[in-house]
Amino acid sequence: MKKRYVWLVIGLLITLASLIAISQTRATLHQVSEQPQGSVVTEAEMLARLAQGTQVPFTRFVAADWQVPLSGLVNLNHPKAKQAKLVDKNEAIHIFAYHIQHPIQGDYLIDTGVSAQLLDDPAKFGINAILHSLFGFELLNLHQSTQAYLAAAQRPAIKGVFLTHLHLDHISGLPDLALETPIYVGNNEGQSRYWMNVATQHVINSLLKGRPALQQWQGDIVDIFGDGSVFALHMPGHTPGSTAYLVNAQTGPVLVVGDVSHTQWGWDNQVEPGQFTQNQAQNQTSLQQLKSLAAQLQQQYPSSQVMLGHQYSR
């Protein structure tokens, strides 16, 4: 009996150690650089620079249509979700990417779209049959690959990628971009630790293999080019380094919120995402900050737009 008790304790300790190890799994083992990029500004300085800054051509394109569980996109336990009687189901969404054409700095993408290479040979990028089903790739329909979009746009090579975060649906266009393309992420995005990273780390490592170190924004608000054309806004919660981008587009300011809010309903009702989000309380705070900023922009610039993570906004 005593020996059995000892082995039971050992088993529990091993299980506990395994759970702790899993919870500490990094988003990626890829190298990260913390050299400052752009200039750190306050919100007041950002708005002042926006008024006088460089306006840039800006395009959103739809890479793919998809269906994923609503419980991942919206916190169904939120009082507003319960009041609306939302229930879990497959929700139609899109995978977007955004193209910035800076007159001096060149062309940049926000997020990467989808590469046909990844869909044609997922195993090449570490996506086995189990992960293929887990990610729901059978419900993903390619609309326009990143390669096809760039060929049609007839623009120079992409000078860099500004990621909203490191989730697969936001980096799945990387195979269509040159290996030397710089990649920028939010502070602590690459080193962030979370138990779900166990399932995704290998895939992210595969997509980043051979690429430069991830460049992390060092500040809550960064004027990327120093000319008021594009700002990176640290909005943690969905992931620790989740980043929104404010673009001084020729048609008016555009606020790209990333997955701080996936859906129109979540944005309208100020309800944070559900199971896909790492820290819902922190995500809610970031969502409120972006709602406030969007209201200020709308008041000053009636043509301003909000672009949500995975649905069109009204």
Image (cartoon, helix red, strand yellow):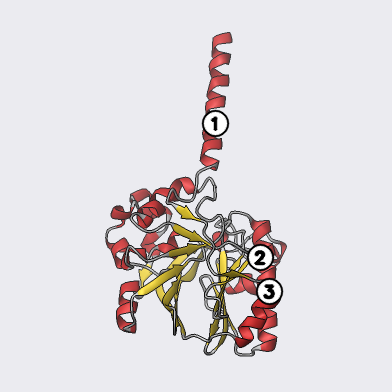
Q: 52 or 253, which is in the foreground? A: 52
Say what amino acid the circle numbered 3 marks: Glu
- Residue 296 in the image: state x and y as whole percent: 70, 81
Q: 159 or 68, which is in the foreground? A: 159
Residue bearing mark 2: 286
Q: Quadrant of the C terminus?
A: bottom right
**Can the viewer see residue 311 in this picture?**
yes
Residue bearing mark 1: 17
Question: Badge 1: how crowded within 10 Å, few (<14), some, or many (20+)?
Answer: few
* Residue 43 disc label: 3
Question: Badge 3: how crowded within 10 Å, few (<14), some, or many (20+)?
Answer: some
Residue found at x 66% / y 85%:
298
**Can the viewer see residue 270 in this picture?**
no
Q: Which image quadrant is residue 219 in? A: bottom right
93 sits to left or right of 298: left
Residue found at x 31% / y 83%:
154
Mark nearest the camera among 1 and 3 is: 3
Q: From mark 2 to mark 1, how far is it between C-alphas? A: 33 Å
Say what amino acid the circle numbered 1 marks: Ala
Mark nearest the camera among 2 and 3 is: 3
- Residue 225 in the image: state x and y as whole percent: 52, 75
49 sits to left or right of 117: right
Question: Badge 2: how crowded within 10 Å, few (<14), some, or many (20+)?
Answer: many
* Residue 215 disc label: none
Q: 24 or 123, which is in the foreground? A: 24
- Residue 202 in the image: state x and y as whole percent: 39, 48
Say what amino acid the circle numbered 2 marks: Ser
Q: Quadrant of the N terminus?
A: top right
Could you tell which of marks 2 and 1 lies nearer the N-terminus? Answer: 1
